Amino acid sequence: MLPRLPLDDRTYAEIVQQTRKLIPKRLPEWTDENAHDPGITMLELFAWLTEMQRYYLSRVPDRNRKKFLDLLGVQPRDTASAEALVRFSGVREHVTLPKGTKLLAEDQVFETLAKAELRPLMLERILCRTERESSDVTASNDHLHVSFYPFGSDAKSGSKLYISFDRELQPDVPVALTFKLLRSDESLKDIYDSASEDELTLLAPSAKLSWKAYGWDEAAGKAAWTPLEVLSDETRHLTVSGTVRIALSSPMRSVTVHPAGDRPRFWFCCTVEEEGYEMPPKISSLMLHTAHAVQRDTLCEYVEAEAAGEELEAFVMDSYLAAYGDVRLQIEADGGGWIEQSAQSFAVDRSGAGHATTVRLMSGSERRVLPAGRKIRLIASTPDFYRYRMAGRSNGLPNQSFELYELPCRKRNAIGLQVGRLDSSGKMVWEDWSAVDGFDRSGPGDRHYIYRPEERTITFGNGERGAIPEACPDDNISLIACELGGGERGNVKPGLIREWAHEDQRKLGIEVSNPFYAAGGSEAETLNESLTRAASELKVAFRAVTDEDYEVIARQTPGVEVARAKAIPLYKPGLSDYPKEKAHGQLSLVVVPEGLSPTPMPSPGFLQTVSSYLEPRRLVTTELHVIPPVYVKVTVHAVIVVEPPFADETERFAALLKGLLRPLDGKDGERGWTFGRTVYKGDIYGALTKGSGVVFVQDLWLDAEGPHVSKSAGGDIVLPPHGLVYSGEHEIELISRTRL
């Protein structure tokens, strides 16, 4: 008998009791609840059936639950590695760090995700200039817990951010500036924006920036501010955090810029050409010499290339393991698979620029000239990986399992595997096998295996579900890729990544640190956690069908902050007599962004981003319009009779009206004004009479300013369907009751 897993611990008696308590609420006319009543008999019958159903459902094994999840397209999440932004300082000469450079945070290894170019360059001064003021924010940038607005709190056109360096930059040498922006909903301990790079591909910038440097203008024959070439901009014009890579096209010249007027310097200038930020950018840190690192320890990796058919051909592998580890070479066999090359058949040269490793075929090799298009594979590993490379020898039997005793790989895809077979000439041919989560979809000839991190075992199929590795007299289960690391321990605090793993890099004298928390590391998801997540994800809207779906999905748009969204069915822009006149098959979505203004307006880029995100999620038969709100200023004129002690509290009553007539939700949980809802005098009466000391409202009338607004015969303000109100300067006159 399978062990019981209680999905519902209610007994039969409890189910009956709870159901009978619902009778007065659901069927108040049912008053006879005695045992002789047929309804009670049916209730007890269904309670018994429910209890029996729960009893059997509780005996569903984990294997079946995993299959149910698979039918829903849900897989338990694998172990994830933390990511961190690392910064290098003390650079005295040009240094190239290869991809995969290993850094240490106590006993944990982090690796850089890309090659990094470090040059002897420092930021000297950072200035912010608007039409009203100029300020030096260098000290703010040096302290990570102090942020600043690079273009002021309104980010108007013409606002400038000046960045100076301690020396002249050379033309055609890229400079990478990393911006950490502080969003309205995150703290300084956060390192990345919530959206991934793939999700941000649809992000259209709300404003447009230009970059210039003070240098020599060849056309004019004098020093001037000349345009810079922006090679890449991950920030989308300072909309999200990221790196901007810039290159000079002409020599720089020094100049004095106020308020840093003590001496001339070499300057970059970033200018707001087209304003439109909903939320002006706020920089928590501007840095040079940065790299993204992930918490992992790669022991073996490989790259593939194609031969060009040349004699003594050379192939390049640019990575940390290739620069400091062992390199092997495999060449594609004629009938498929790979042939391992002896160490005498190729030469490894590590003297290239930027730690690039070159592997060159020797003239004595059997394949001195490879046919054009023939694939080669370069495998780089740590010097001691040879001890772990061979996992075992196949005996040709079904369901073989091999244990990786000394390799605590925590991810399901952490290893790459080859299985060797002897060809007709007795030469070992290595074939690639693929990792899968199960053999349910594997056929007899599919070279599949399962790696179970919790058991550190590799399992092969039985010949019907997954192929069986060919029996061999020698070890023929080989690893060609291996990665350690992952989990919550990688979410280290700031300043903990501070050591180099390799002695040669320590000698460079460059300091490394992580200015922010590492984030994103998580443990592998358990089955119960997967079931809970699947149940919650089923309730999340991913297709826009109902009006509420459009509103919910719009608020989830990556890269933008949507404060409010309202779907208006059967409406399109320009429809004058709605709802009498309807646009069939069309829907308008009004979006209000987060902003510092009391009436924030979305830019065209903001509207385009939301529209692009909703486009693949809408119904094919629905024409979607993403539109801005229409703001209507409502001014209240009121004469109120109050008790004598309250005759001087005009501001309090004005504050009550501002709390009522506001477009955005309040921090106290109160909702903003409903889209398109008419402002009735009764609303105003209700707000004013909430104030203490009110005897009665003697007189009241309303004024409104805004497009598509009208006033009813009774003096109420009628809004368009996408209209929102905000308060004007209310005129409140208080009269003491004793003066009547």
Image (tube, rainbow, N blue to C red):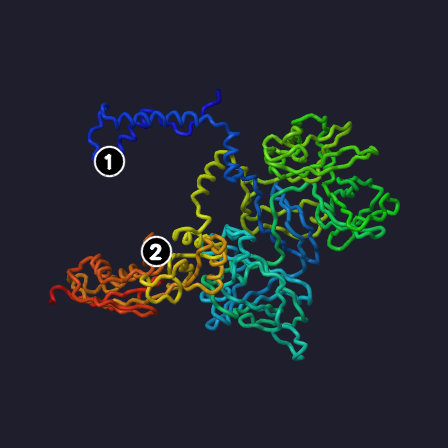
Closer-to-camera residue (580/99):
580
Q: Residue at x 49, y 37 (%)?
A: 530
- Let me know if residue 144 appears in the view: yes
Residue 366 lies in quadrant:
top right
Q: With 711 as the anchor, is 276 left or right in this view?
A: right
Q: With 666 as the anchor, is 485 left or right in this view?
A: right
Closer-to-camera residue (585/609):
585
Closer-to-camera residue (305/360):
305
Dots 1 and 2: beta carbons under 8 Å? Answer: no
Residue at label 1?
A: 27
- Let me know if residue 732 appears in the view: no
**Numbered circle sitting on residue 666:** 2
Q: Which residue is drawn at 67% across and 79% down?
A: 221
Residue 171: percent from the left, percent from the top?
69, 67
Residue 248: percent from the left, percent from the top?
66, 67
Residue 706: percent from the left, percent from the top?
33, 69
Calculate the distance from the C-alpha at mark 1 to the C-alpha at mark 2. 40 Å
Residue 658: percent from the left, percent from the top?
30, 62
